[in-house]
Every structure is written in C-alpha cells, then in structure tokens.
Amino acid sequence: MVSFISAKDAKSIWGKSHRGFFADQKTAAKKNKYNAKKRSLDGITFDSMREATRYLQLKRRQDSGEISELKCHPRYQLVWGKVKICSYRPDFTYILKKKLVVEDVKSPATNTYDFRLKKKMMKAAYGLDVLVIY
C-alpha cells in the first residue's frame, strides 16, 4: 500500500514544503546531444561555435556592404490552410542582390528528418529555399 503525506506534514518533518524539498538538490547542467557548446556574441546566443563563426563572417559581409538586413533566428510560422503546423527558426536571413536568403548552419548529425521536412515546408509556404551551410 502506498501512503502519501500532506504538505503540512512534509513541512513539519523536513522543515520545508514538498515543493521546496527537491529544489535544494543540485542538478547537473544538461549536455547537448550533439556536443555543441553555446556561444554568445553581440548579445546573441548561438547554439554552436560553427554558427557563431558564420555570424561573424556574415557580419563582416554586411559591414562591407555585400549583404544587408542581417537577422539572427527570425521566426517563420508554417501554416497549412488555416492551421498552424509548427514554426521554424533559421539561423540567419539577409538580403543579397535584392533577394532574401534564408540560411541554416548544420552538421551531418543535425541534418535531421525534422529539419529536412521544415525546409520543404518553407519552400511550399513561402517559396524560399533554405541554404544549408555545413
């Protein structure tokens, strides 16, 4: 037989409520499943060093005037009819020769089925090809 104790009893036994009991235990930092380490540049957090390096390359191209309107992690709603299916956040968008470029930095491990499906949905919904940088 399983027995439960009330929050009042927990507080009297352990000196704190049941909600605060497990909060004192330290949890290990969650490791990225692709071993990528987050990086921050210019107040923007990137999921990997490769993505942060690509940002620096694009920033340099923007400063030289080759590209314009560089945006990091914009959100696109992928809708079928009137139903929102999901959202997609590419790594970068920018204007190159008066054309919008949508870019995502990937490794072979992160080129997953979900990503490939969202890439096709971007083409269907917005007519935009996603440029994949390896």
Image (spheres, rainbow, N blue to C red):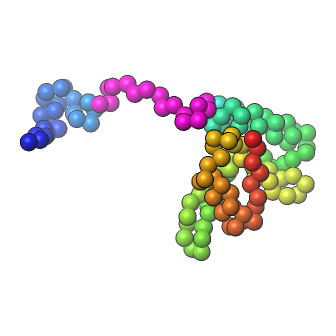
Looking at the image, which is closer to me, 3 or 24? 3
Q: Quadrant of residue 117?
A: bottom right
Point 61% across, 32% down: residue: 36
Q: Quadrant of residue 50?
A: top right
Point 91% across, 45% down: residue: 66
- Apparent side of residue 59 relative to residue 6 in the rendered image (left or right): right
Is 75 magenta? The answer is no
Looking at the image, which is closer to me, 49 or 77? 49
Where's residue 10, x and y in %?
Answer: 16, 32
Where's residue 41, x and y in %?
Answer: 70, 32
Where's residue 5, x and y in %?
Answer: 13, 38
Where's residue 51, x and y in %?
Answer: 71, 37
Q: Say which quadrant the C terminus sits in.
A: top right
Looking at the image, which is closer to me, 82 or 36? 36
Residue 75 visible within the image:
no
Residue 78 visible within the image:
yes
Q: Say which quadrant the N terminus sits in.
A: top left
- Apparent side of residue 70 relative to residue 19 in the rendered image (left or right): right
- Apparent side of residue 94 relative to residue 30 in the rendered image (left or right): right
Range of residues picked out in magenta: 22-38
Query: Is residue 29 positioned above or below 94 on the image?
Result: above
